[in-house]
Image (cartoon, coloured by chain):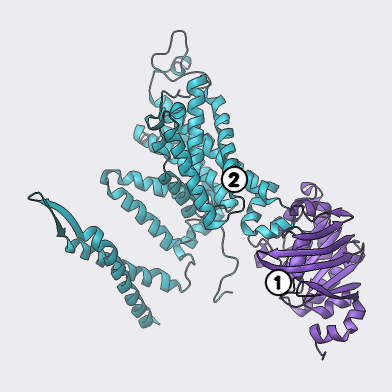
Chain colours: A purple, B cyan
Amino acid sequence: MLNISKVETFYGNIQALRGVDVKVNNGEIVALIGSNGAGKSTLLMTISGVNKAATGEILFDSKSIANMPPHDIVNLGISQVPEGRRIFSRLTVEDNLRLGASVNEKGKNFDRDSKDVYDLFPVLKDRLSQRGGTLSGGEQQMLAIGRAMMARPKVLLLDEPSLGIAPKLVNQIFTSIKNINKEKKVTVFLVEQNAKKALELADRGYVLVNGKISLEGQGKDLLNNPDVQAAYLEGGK
Amino acid sequence: MGKDLIQKSLKDSLFTGIIALALFGPIVGLRTVAKNEVLVVEPKWFVVLLIVAFCALGRFFINIYTYKKEQRRGEPSSLGKAISNFLDEKGAQIAIAAIAFSIIFPFMPFADRYWMDIAIMMMTYIMLGWGLNIVIGLAGLLDLGYVAFYAVGAYSYALFAIHFGWSFWICLPIAGVFAGLFGILLGFPVLRLRGDYLAIVTLAFGEMIRILLLNWYELTKGPDGLTGIPRPSFFGLPFKRYPDEGVETFHTFFGLEYDPMQRIIFLYYLILVLALITNAFTIKIRRLPVGRAWEALREDEIACKSLGVNPRNTKLTAFAIGAMFGGFAGSFFATRQAFISPESFTFIESAIIVAIVVLGGMGSQTGVVLSTIFLIGLIEVFRDFESYRMVAFGGAMVLIMIFRPRGILAKRKPTITMGKHG
């Protein structure tokens, strides 16, 4: 469904991605793990078109999207939940959701789509008129995911959904991601620092080191891989 | 705590005194006078001393009564809070009352020619403020060259009216379209710019338009300006004492005595309607996708992109629509003055409009009205004091910044505050 080959991305003179190959199949949950600065977020930003790939190819349903502007990519069905949530903190929760629906026929189906989001995250329904910035971190993350779901994506890109969130809520959010995948049939590409949680959830996983994929495999296999345990999981060595 | 506060404030006011001395010492203290045909420097140290003492003492009292007392800088003072709460609660009633007052204003006993002129001027600035509020307050794009669109509107109205003889009601939308096109013209090169850089380019754009108007003599008559711009008519009925042969005028049609005030009152209602249209449009568009996208763009451009909001189109519509209202105001200005020259469109106009929007509290429609009344009213009240007008203007801005640092009506309350409540 999403086929990334030999992608290289630069920030000015600094090369962040050094030829990345990643494949995400329809209906999968794929996790990308790696340490700080490995290029995980850059890869997501390159897929969604906010950063542009200098070389390489990104195919979505065998259509090249490497040179498309971000809004066209969202229109095709790839939605991103950016790192750090990036809620519009001075707009209301409802306005945030409506903005998520900007590409979805200009929000024509807002009522139906928002109902799906409230089923997923009931807490949002009680907060509709509240400003986004007044929500807790976990609620903001739910809003960010809900906002991305408003565009009815085929692929959901999630950038560190567990960042800075209470452990209890992390479990809840990971459960919701599973639901999105199983019930709403949305393919998920997940970037995480919390390697254990991500690999437990994922069908397959990739390990990114210094802008290159160093390992790939089934989620469970990676979880048991001694190198991965040593580098990213507690109790390794 | 109390002793500490006084000590700190004293130290601070000492610094203020030193800065004031360095500033005003050479500017005010040294005066050149011609004595026996020789230029000599005559010091005026007493005046300098007065100014320095005023600054130092003023700073001391400001410290004690506002900044340090509130503990948290930027937190609105209790008086300001009371005013905002009052306006939040009774906002709708106050707005209706204000509109009702502005409708009956021309028939108030004190509304003579002088008051009407001031009211028309204020309305023009309110309309410009509301137009610029779309660009600055909603879309968050700091535009320091707004006067350019005002000028484009005025000149396109004047040129079409003079050369083609088209009426005000045809030229008005044309002027708006022209100004909107110039808004897009400015928008394209600044799409990638933000903050300070955007401000610099828009500032330059404003100057470019003015210099263009000054030098394109064949079209604009340069510094001579355009004269004989047709006055607006009341749906075809002109306001003239001695009309051309066979032309019915406003006063004959309604069977009234001729009075020049009729035209002034008509102009007043014209700008009132134009301003109210601007306001209604802004209120409405905030609830529509494009308005929501503007506000989202102001908050976070990357998040916007990841949601599929097209930042290019969103920014361009903000520039174009803001400019269009500037153009409408410009054509009104041209028809009121009947004479325009590049001198009316200098940077100071842009600065005043930006000041109105920023001091009113960015994004607040009522704030624009209040700060216009405050700033423009103050300039008028101090008209008799000639050169002290600008001092009063500057002083008013300083006072607002001290007591209401987020603008008179800071609608955009902080989402996170440090300290006790946090």
| Amino acid type at mark 2 | Gly
Q: Does any portion of residue A59 appear in the rendered image?
A: yes
Q: Would residue B172 appear left or right of B9 to someone viewing this image?
A: right
How would you rate the neighbour count of disc 2 (Cα within 10 Å): few for under 14, some for 14-19, many for 20 or more?
many
Q: Would residue B34 appear left or right of B24 to someone viewing this image?
A: left
How would you rate the neighbour count of disc 1 (Cα within 10 Å): few for under 14, some for 14-19, many for 20 or more?
some
Q: Are marks 2 and 1 on the same chain?
A: no
- Give the quadrant of the C terminus of chain B: bottom right
Looking at the image, which is closer to me, A160 or B272?
A160
Q: CA distance from mark 2 to mark 1?
A: 36 Å
Chain hosting mark 1: A
Give the residue at mark 2: B187
> Mark 2 or 1, which is nearer the eye?
2
The single residue placed furthest to the top in the displayed view is B246
Classify residue A96 by image quadrant.
bottom right
Q: Would residue B168 appear left or right of A122 to someone viewing this image?
A: left
Give the residue at mark 1: A137
